[in-house]
Amino acid sequence: MDRLQAMTVFVRVVESGSFSAAARLMHLGQPAVSKAVAQLERQLGVQLLLRSAHGLTPTDAGQRYFERVARIVSDAEDADAAARDSTLSLQGRLRVAVPTTFGRIQIVPRLGDFLKKHPRLKMDIELDDRRVDLVAEGIDIAIRVGPLNDSTMIAKRLARGRRSVLATPRYLEQSLVLETPEDLALHQAVTYARDDGGRYVFHQQGKDVSATLSPRLNLSAAEGIRAAVLADLGLTIAADWMFLPELECGTVVRCLTNWSLPPVDLWVVYPSGRLTSAKARAFSDFVAGVVGELETVSRLMC
């Protein structure tokens, strides 16, 4: 068995959790699968898998090896697909990182059509608000919101999203007047820990006004902000798509609508230093389609 095939066997063993499952996936005998992994371990001089009555798990060295080798196997499959001009039937594994709220509200509910179009494609989706290290964590493509601080990534802006002051009608009924940006200082604010200082610049007919939110609650995740606002604990400043379902039904409303805020950018990001895979390009096109098909895109996008 050649080196690439042995790597492929190892990747399938880790993904499936057993020699027998990998053998079935690859239409090989189980002894051939075991032999391929043992061959890799001899060549590398390290143990890659821990074998027990409960199954197989990678060692620390095995996990590091898997993360690198899985990318090699995926690239080889992409190369085969490109040679056959068969991009409509993508296969292998695609690793994606998406901000939690955007992924939960906009991406995951629409994945059915994408997966149906590519029945041989498997996906790992990291729903996380942190800036995932694409190279270190083996991510093929990421969706990011806001400014990009890492100039080493390959990035394409998909949209510019409208940002608003948002609150529930019940909170507004129980609170002080909110007619100008200066009035925000009188209100309970729910803020995002990753925002820079909570200072915002509002624009109206050639006039700029700065306002600073005084947070009652400062949260490290967008899902926490949603929960706090929906519990009538205060107002927030956020991209409209964060509260799209609630804006559509009136559970959350925009405030200070005569004023505008700088928009928030939505990006698709790839690791630098390597060709973008067909799978990543297909997912990028899918996300662009999601943004374009939003029923309220004219109200949410600038």
Image (cartoon, grey):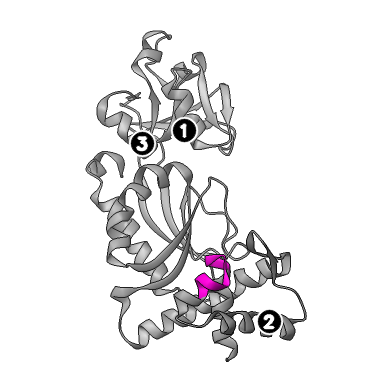
Tell which circle, 3 or 2, labels the residue nearer the N-terminal end. 2
Mark identifier at residue 38? 2
3 or 1: mark nearer the eye:
3
Please indicate whether residue 119 sits to the left or right of residue 147 in the image: left
Provide the residue designation for mark 1.
201
- Residue 94 seen by the camera: yes
Identify which residue, 208 or 38, lies in the foreground.
38
Tell which circle, 1 or 2, labels the residue nearer the N-terminal end. 2
Vertical order, 17 against 215 (above or below): below
Give the residue furthest to the bottom.
Answer: 2
Position in image of residue 265 (x %, y %) = 42, 49
Q: Which residues are magenta?
A: 14-22
Identify which residue, 189 or 252, lies in the foreground.
252
- Residue 264 seen by the camera: no
For marks 1 and 2, give the CA distance: 61 Å
Provide the residue designation for mark 3.
240
Quadrant containing the C terminus in the rendered view: top left
Please indicate whether residue 245 sits to the left or right of residue 151 in the image: left
Tell which circle, 3 or 1, labels the residue nearer the N-terminal end. 1
Position in image of residue 124 (x %, y %) = 48, 59
Quick one: SS at disc 3? helix
Quick one: SS at disc 1? strand
**Does the magenta run of residues contain 21?**
yes
For marks 3 and 2, give the CA distance: 53 Å
